[in-house]
Image (cartoon, rainbow, N blue to C red):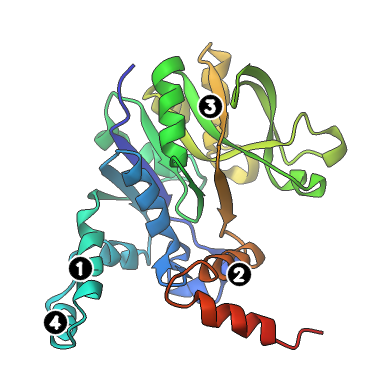
Amino acid sequence: MKKIRKAVIPAAGFGTRFLPQTKALPKEMLPIVDKPVIQYVVEEIVASGVKDIIIVTGALKRAIEDHFDVPNQDLIKNLEQGDKHELLEQTRMISEMANFIYVRQKGLYGNGTPVLAAEPIIEDEPFAVLWGDEFIYSKPPRLAQMMEVHQELGGIVISGVRIEKKEDLKRYGIADLELVRNNVYKIKSIVEKPDPDSAPSNIATHGAYIVPPEIFRALKSLKPGKGGEIWLVDAINLLQNEGVPVYAVEIQNGRYYDTGNKLEYMKTVVELALEHPDIKTEFKKFLKDLDIR
C-alpha cells in the first residue's frame, strides 16, 4: 500500500455562519487564542509525517497564504529590535512546517469540488483530506491513526467520532458499522443527519478522509446532488458500490473541536485558553469572577 505523502485542505467556503466577521477574513483564519484554526489542522498533518499540503482556496482567502508565508522584513525587524526572539522563531517556523501548495477552486459549489481541484498535484496516489475549519486534538494525531489503518487495510478510511449526546446525532453523518477490531469498523452505509431514535450508531464519520486517486473519476461522474452541489460522500458511496472497502477509525485519546459554528467555536476558544500556559491562570480567575445570571 502506497504511503500517504500529500494532504488536501479545502478552504474555499464563504463562512456564512460567521458573517459579518468573515466578509473579509477567511473562516479558517479565525483565532483560537493565538493561532488560527487552520494552523491546528496543518500541525496535525505535519505531526503525522505528511509534508506536502495542498490548500484549496477561493476569493478573499489571501490571508491564508500570507499566514503560512515567511514573515515580512518589517515584522522581523520589529521583533528583533524588541528582543522578542522566541516570537520571531515561532513565526518563522510557521512557513517551514510544510511544503505549501495553493490551488484556486473552480466549478460547482460543494465539498467535493475543492478535492477535484487538487487532482493535477495529487496524480496517481492515495491522499488525505482534512477540513480547514475543524480539528481533533489527539495523541497520536488523528491522521496518523488513520494512516496506520490504511497501510494495513487499504480502501477508504474516514475518521470516526463518538457522539455522546443522543440529540446531537441529527447534526452529523452517522455510520452503520461492522466491527473489524478494536476501534476499526467497516462502514456499511452512512446516514446523513438521521433522526436520533433511528440512527444506526452513535459514531459520526467526518472531518478527515484517506481516499484513493479513483476518487477523482468518481467526482467527475457525479451530477449535482443536494443543494445543487458536488459532495465528497457521494463519490465515496460510488466507489463503495464498485467494491472499494470503506473503514471508520474511532479516534483514540482525542477531543473533537467543531469550530464551524459560533457556539462550538466559542467553546473551543474558552477550553484551549484554559490550557494556554501564558494566560490560563488569569483567565480561569476571570471566568470564576464573572457574575453569570
Q: Earlier in the sequence, mark 2 or mark 3?
A: 3
Amino acid type of the residue tagged 3 in the rendering: Ile
Q: Nearer the viewer, mark 2 or mark 1?
A: 1
Q: Quadrant of residue 287?
A: bottom right
Q: Secondary structure at mark 1?
A: helix
Res 266 label: 2
* Residue 13 pos. (x, y %): 48, 57
Instruction: Decide: few, some or many residues near mark 2? Use Cα within 10 Å; few <14, some 14-19, many ≥20.
Output: few
Pointer 4: what residue? 80
Instruction: Decide: few, some or many residues near mark 1? Use Cα within 10 Å; few <14, some 14-19, many ≥20.
Output: few
Q: Earlier in the sequence, mark 1 or mark 3?
A: 1
* Residue 281 pos. (x, y %): 53, 78
Instruction: Decide: few, some or many residues near mark 4? Use Cα within 10 Å; few <14, some 14-19, many ≥20.
Output: some
Amino acid type of the residue tagged 2 in the rendering: Met
| Labelled pair 2, 4 in contact (Cβ < 8 Å) | no
Q: Secondary structure at mark 4?
A: helix
Pointer 1: what residue? 89
| Labelled pair 1, 3 in contact (Cβ < 8 Å) | no
Farthest residue, direction top: 243
Distance from disc 3 to disc 4, alpha carbons, whole Å, reads 50 Å
Location of residue 286 with respect to 95 vertically, above or below = below
Pointer 3: what residue? 236
Q: Nearer the viewer, residue 160 or 68?
A: 160
Distance from disc 2 to disc 3, alpha carbons, whole Å, reads 32 Å
* Residue 141 pos. (x, y %): 43, 42
Q: Earlier in the sequence, mark 1 or mark 4?
A: 4
Amino acid type of the residue tagged 4 in the rendering: Glu
Q: Quadrant of residue 72?
A: bottom left
Amino acid type of the residue tagged 1 in the rendering: Glu
Q: Nearer the viewer, residue 264 or 17?
A: 264
Q: Quadrant of the N terminus?
A: top left
